[in-house]
Image: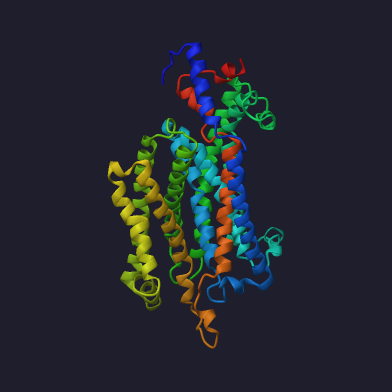
């Protein structure tokens, strides 16, 4: 950081930073086309949900035995991916890692998108969604479902605050920028809550961000721990485990980081942010991905080694289905292409660059989603109750077109949230970037 810049140099540097980071902002023709495409796909998915509401959950392949299918696997994946906000903003931010500045806001956008839609994913699994209010009206503190609803809602609110608070100085500076649409400058003026960049305001801002960053750590750990308890609190084979809390949390970091890498690559390339999101960021994120993936690999080994060593009769049936039975191809593909091979490849610095990491992250995201599917579905195919005198489609679970369309719809909503936020607000903090470049009072320079 250079603290010896003259006022003119600071003005020129701030002008360049501001122009670079606000260039993508605004509702242009490409954004209209993109949102129109997403809207058309979402309408088709909502029609699939209408069919499910009309005909019942049977059209989704969900029956008495396999009562949780793609929907719950998707919910677990969404909750997992949302933890990236906590990892980047809280864990790395509180540790003093300055290099996260250009990617922290991107991580929070991802967190908001996935966490906000996670609740709707749960609704898609309900046969009578109009009874959702009963969860709150007749809540029982003993129910893990109530815990899950509570921590998800709390996490969304804190994530929104962690996204909004660092935006205040940016909006304060941009409210008079003539290159932005007038209506957007008015929005900035309202949301900036009279920001002037005084030392007192900065002190309050830094303290508020720090408090939120501290608060989000236990809430983020709780959100996925409680989700894991929805499984582990039962006596079902494959779920009856004491490691599910840390197992789910470590897996959440893996899927969240891979989503972040994909978003970093997109924003860097399409928003021309190569000077701000550099190859060094991909290198550092790649190292973190190796670390959390190794922890997750340890829990994966523990998940199967212990029951495999004891090999109780019911566990044997479940493990055979995963390792050598009907789910073997998917199981080994997930372990190899979604975890083991990425770990090996990312050990090499040449692979920890933007292009290779994009490809690896796509495989990791797919592997993370199918891993949740393997957690949710196979264990329900081996119930304690005997399966006798029931139709064949009650015994064998297969994802249907309706179920797939509704699942795709949830991803479309996440993309919509991310797209809108990225077009209304800078995806990289202007004021923090300016401070790191030696610009001490960017508000005064921008107001001059």
Q: Is residue 180 above or below residue 8?
A: below
Q: Identify the image quadrant of the N terminus.
A: top left
Q: Quadrant of residue 247?
A: bottom left
Q: Identify the image quadrant of the C terminus.
A: top right
Q: Position of residue 96 (x, y in %)?
A: 43, 32
Foreground residue among 168 and 38:
38
Q: Position of residue 61 (x, y in %)?
A: 56, 73
Question: Left or right: 192 with respect to 264?
Answer: right
* Residue depicted at x 59% and y 52%: 38
Q: Position of residue 398 (x, y in %)?
A: 50, 73
- Can the viewer see residue 158 in this picture? no
* Residue depicted at x 54% and y 63%: 72
Question: Left or right: 250 with respect to 30?
Answer: left
Q: Position of residue 367 (x, y in %)?
A: 41, 58
- Can the viewer see residue 243 in this picture? yes
Q: Is residue 406 above or below residue 180?
A: below
* Residue depicted at x 69% and y 58%: 136
Q: Quadrant of residue 3?
A: top left
* Residue depicted at x 57% and y 66%: 403
Residue, far bottom: 389
């Amino acid at each position: 950081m250079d603290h010896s810049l003259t006022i003119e140099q600071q003005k020129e540097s701030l002008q360049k930073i501001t122009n670079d980071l606000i260039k993508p902002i605004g509702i242009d023709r490409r954004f209209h086309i993109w949102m129109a495409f997403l809207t058309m796909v979402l309408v088709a998915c909502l029609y699939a949900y209408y069919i499910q509401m009309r005909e019942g959950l049977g059209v989704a392949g969900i029956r008495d035995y396999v009562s949780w299918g793609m929907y719950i696997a998707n919910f677990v994946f969404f909750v997992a991916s949302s933890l990236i906000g906590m990892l980047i903003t809280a864990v790395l931010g509180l540790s003093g890692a300055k290099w996260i500045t250009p990617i922290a806001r991107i991580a929070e956008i991802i967190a908001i998108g996935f966490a906000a839609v996670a609740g709707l994913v749960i609704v898609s699994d309900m046969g009578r969604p109009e009874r959702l209010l009963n969860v709150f009206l007749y809540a029982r503190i003993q129910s893990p479902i109530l815990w899950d609803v509570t921590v998800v809602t709390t996490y969304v609110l804190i994530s929104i605050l962690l996204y909004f608070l660092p935006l205040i100085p940016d909006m304060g500076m941009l409210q008079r920028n003539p290159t932005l649409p007038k209506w957007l400058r008015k929005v900035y003026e309202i949301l900036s809550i009279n920001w002037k960049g005084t030392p007192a305001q900065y002190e309050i801002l830094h303290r508020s961000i720090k408090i939120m960053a501290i608060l989000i750590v236990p809430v983020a750990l709780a959100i996925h721990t409680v989700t894991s308890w929805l499984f582990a609190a039962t006596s079902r084979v494959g779920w009856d485990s004491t490691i599910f809390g840390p197992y789910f949390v470590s897996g959440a970091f893996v899927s969240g980081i891979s989503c972040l890498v994909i978003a970093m690559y997109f924003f860097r390339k399409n928003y021309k942010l190569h000077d701000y999101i550099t190859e060094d960021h991909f290198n550092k994120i790649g190292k973190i991905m190796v670390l959390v993936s190794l922890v997750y690999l340890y829990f994966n080994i523990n998940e199967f080694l212990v029951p495999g060593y004891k090999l109780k009769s019911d566990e044997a049936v479940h493990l055979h289905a995963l390792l050598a039975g009907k789910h073997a191809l998917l199981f080994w593909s997930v372990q190899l292409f979604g975890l083991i091979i990425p770990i090996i490849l990312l050990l090499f610095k040449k692979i920890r660059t933007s292009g290779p990491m994009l490809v690896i992250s796509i495989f990791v995201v797919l592997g993370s989603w199918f891993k949740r599917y393997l957690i949710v579905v196979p264990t329900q195919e081996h119930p304690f109750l005997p399966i006798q005198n029931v139709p064949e489609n009650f015994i064998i679970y297969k994802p249907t077109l309706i179920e797939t369309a509704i699942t795709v719809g949830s991803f479309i909503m996440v993309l919509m949230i991310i797209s809108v936020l990225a077009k209304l607000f800078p995806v990289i903090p202007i004021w923090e970037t300016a401070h790191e470049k030696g610009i001490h009072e960017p508000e005064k320079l921008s107001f001059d």
